[in-house]
Every structure is written in C-alpha cells, then in structure tokens.
Image (cartoon, grey):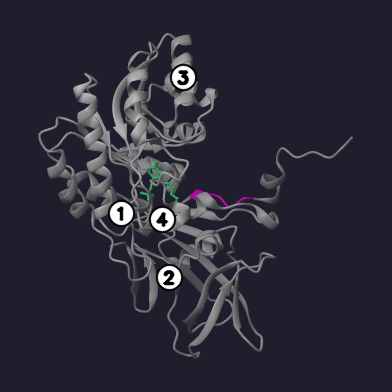
Amino acid sequence: MDHFVYRDGALWAEDCAVADIAARHGTPCYIYSRATLTRHFRAFDDALAGTDHLVCYAVKANSNLAVLQVLARLGAGFDIVSGGELARVLRAGGDPARVVFSGVGKTEEEMRAALQAGIYCFNVESEFELHTLDAIARSMNRRAPVALRVNPDVDAKTHPYIATGLKTNKFGVDIATAEQLYTQAARLAGIEIVGIASHIGSQLLEITPFLDALERVLALVDRLDARGIALRHIDVGGGLGVRYKDENPPLPQHWAQAIRPRLAGRRLRILAEPGRAIAGNAGILVTRVLGIKSTQAKTFAIVDAAMNDLLRPTLYQAWMDIVPVRVRSDVPVRTYDVVGPVCETGDWLGKDRPLAIAPGDWLAVRTAGAYGFVMASNYNTRPRAAEVMVDGAHAHLVRARETFEDLVRGESLLP
Ligand code: LLP
C-alpha cells in the first residue's frame, strides 16, 4: 500500500496534488511519500519485533538525504556499498554503529573511512578483501568487525541482472570454501568475526529461495560453531519484491514469519537489508507529454523524462505502471509507446500503453522510488530531475533540478 491515490480524477501524493507539485517544481520530477517510507520501514521492523534485530535499509535503492533522514529518525540501520553512501548516511544523521558495508570492491580509502566512522560490520566478499581489511585495521590499531558474505548458490528466480546468489555471480564467498576462510579470519589480529551474511538477489516474489539460502547458511553456522567460531548475527540480505503490475510478493510480515522459526533458539541477532520493498512504492516519477507523434506502425507519446531519468524499463525490460496525473474523458484512449527525448531506440518508459492523453498532460510512472533517481545519468547533457518529499500537506524540494552549470562543474577548456 502507498499514499499515491486518485481523488476526483486527480492523482495525489498524501495530501498534496501531484499537479501542483509538477507545476511548481517542473518535470521530470520524482515525488516521494514520507508516510509510505515510514509504513514500509515499520512493516519490517514490526515483523522482527520481539527478537534482537536491525533493519538495514539498502541505501543504493534511493540515497536522497531526506529519504535517509526519514529512516534514520525511525532508528533504521543502513546497508551501504561505497564511501559515498557512508558519507550520505552520516550527513543524514544515520548512526554509523548501525551500518553494514557490502560490496565486492571496497577500496582501501573506503575501508579506512568506515573504520574511522565505527561501522557495525563489513560484509567481506573475498579473501583478498579480508587481508586488505586486516592490514588497514591493524595500521589503525583497530579490529574490523566482519561477516563473510557467503554465496549460497540458490536460484532466486529473478531477472538475471539482479540475481546475485548463484555460484556464477561475482558476489560473496563460495559457501563451500567459506569455512576455511572463516578459520583464516579467526587468526587475523585486525579482524573480529561477528557474523555471516548472504543476499541472493532482488525483486524476489517467492519465499522458498530465501529459505533455501537460509538453510545452507545455517548449516555453515553450525559447522563454524563446531570449530569454535561463534557468530553474533546473521544478515539475511534484502531482495523482497514489490508489485509493479500484478505480482504478489510476500509481505514483510510473511517473510519474517517464514524465517523466524528457523532462527529460533540460536541467539543470533537478525539483520535484514531491504531496499526496494521500503522505497519502491514510496515514489513516482512525474513527466509531461511534450507531443504525440504517429507513424504508420506506432503512436508515440514523447515525454520529458527519459532513460537517463529512469533506466529500469530499458535495462531490465521492466514494466512500470504509467498513469495520468489528471484523468480525462474528453480524448479517446489510444495505445502509445511512451518514449523520452534521448537519442536511443532503447529510450522508452513503457510500450503499448492504453492512455487518454493530450500534449501538455502530466503522467506519473508509479513504483519509481527504488532504483529510479539513483540510476539516473546526465546522458545527452540532461540535468537530473528534481526530487520532492511529500509529508502530509507539505511538499519539500529535497533535491533541486540540476542546472547546466552543475553539469559542467569540474570540466575545463584547454589553455
Ligand atoms: N543487499 C545487497 C548486498 C544488495 O546487493 C542489494 C541489492 C540489496 C541488499 C537490496 O536489495 P532489494 O531489497 O532492494 O531488492 N537496479 C536493480 C536492482 C539492483 C539490486 C542490487 N542489490 C533494479 O532496478 O531492479
């Protein structure tokens, strides 16, 4: 459930008319709902209540400072994958002691910054990373808290680009060799073993792959225990899907109900890293119809948002709902390809969409709060969109649209 609803034929974001926001801030424009973010974070937090846990929002899904601030105020932890994301979390008031650091290619500089900040845990993904981290921690007279991110080799049954838990993927440490790497880690003076992590993919629509992964990880936990390596936490990753069209993803509550019994009696703190399920339905992308163009084969609605603003449709052939900001009955419904101004045939937001629209109308792409703005680029020298956070009847501009000067900052002409 989200807080983008129609009232009298007009789309609202909480108690703000989307058309008013679009008129005031221009398009393309992302709009986020604070109430929806809050609701989704609480769904995870409540589902794990009564057991020691930490919900670490995956910052990569939407890293706008205001989004992070809303979640930090709710007591969220954060899953980061770069020094930049760490700096964002700190800037937004997030608690470094609730940060886990994932990623296959952490640089020495990033490791140092994270140690300095005092993060909760490094999710180490390889032997070389373990040794680099050990050396850096020792040089700083510290011990780095570490979980190995293991790759359990399960099929998450999702798009191949966002499946991460197969042994052919670059992620994590092969579960078969993890035991040996833990034994090595236990001997390193700069490393303190605190947990274990896995993440098998994104936009998962079934619970079974989560349980298959958990079973394999827990078997490893038992083997480690037998070797005297005791863990304090288990990080079950993120990946719970959302509804873009007619999918029926498990609710956080059902996901938690399935995993909790398997962890009962183990005295392991549970960490989770949801991104999309928190931010996805909490955002829309508003765009304006620049014009309509018919060819013999197709009718195109050319809009002012493009693949540089929202990459998911063309990158993953993702279907994202496109709805009018004002419903109209004075023009016929026709079938449109909704496309942007970028010079690529792959620049589309939706294909074969029945819409009743005219030039100048605003459209909203729904469920664009996760992996939307964060994947935007400046391709074709297009400024990145404005971002607005709605909070009840207030609409706050939380990122101004970029200007041409923003785009060329750092560039210089030859002497
Ligand atoms: N933890 C780790 C280690 C991850 O790699 C990811 C996502 C998450 C947590 C959060 O997963 P979520 O709960 O959001 O599914 N750009 C793609 C999604 C890439 C996901 C990458 N990793 C998309 O637009 O579908």
- Marked residue nearer the N-terminal end (3 or 4): 4
Residue that numbered label 1 is attached to: 35
Residue that numbered label 2 is attached to: 321
- Marked residue nearer the N-terminal end (3 or 2): 3
CA–CA distance in space, label 1 to label 4? 9 Å
Is 19 located above or below residue 91 in the figure? Answer: below
Q: Is mark 1 within 8 Å of ligand 1?
A: no
Where's the C terminus, which quadrant? top right
Determine crowd level at label 4: few under 14, some 14-19, many 20+ residues with C-alpha closer than 10 A: many
Indicate whether residue 386 is drawn in magenta.
Answer: no
Q: Nearer the viewer, residue 359 or 247?
A: 247
The disc labelled 1 sits on which kind of residue? Ala
At x 38% / y 10%, what residue is drawn?
189
**Does the image show residue 127?**
yes
Q: Is residue 258 left or right of residue 357?
A: left
At x 28% / y 65%, what residue is drawn?
248
Given this view, does label 3 or label 2 mark the residue nearer the observer?
A: 3
Where disc 4 sits, the SS reads strand
Determine crowd level at label 2: few under 14, some 14-19, many 20+ residues with C-alpha closer than 10 A: some
Mark seen at residue 131: 3
Residue that numbered label 4 is attached to: 32
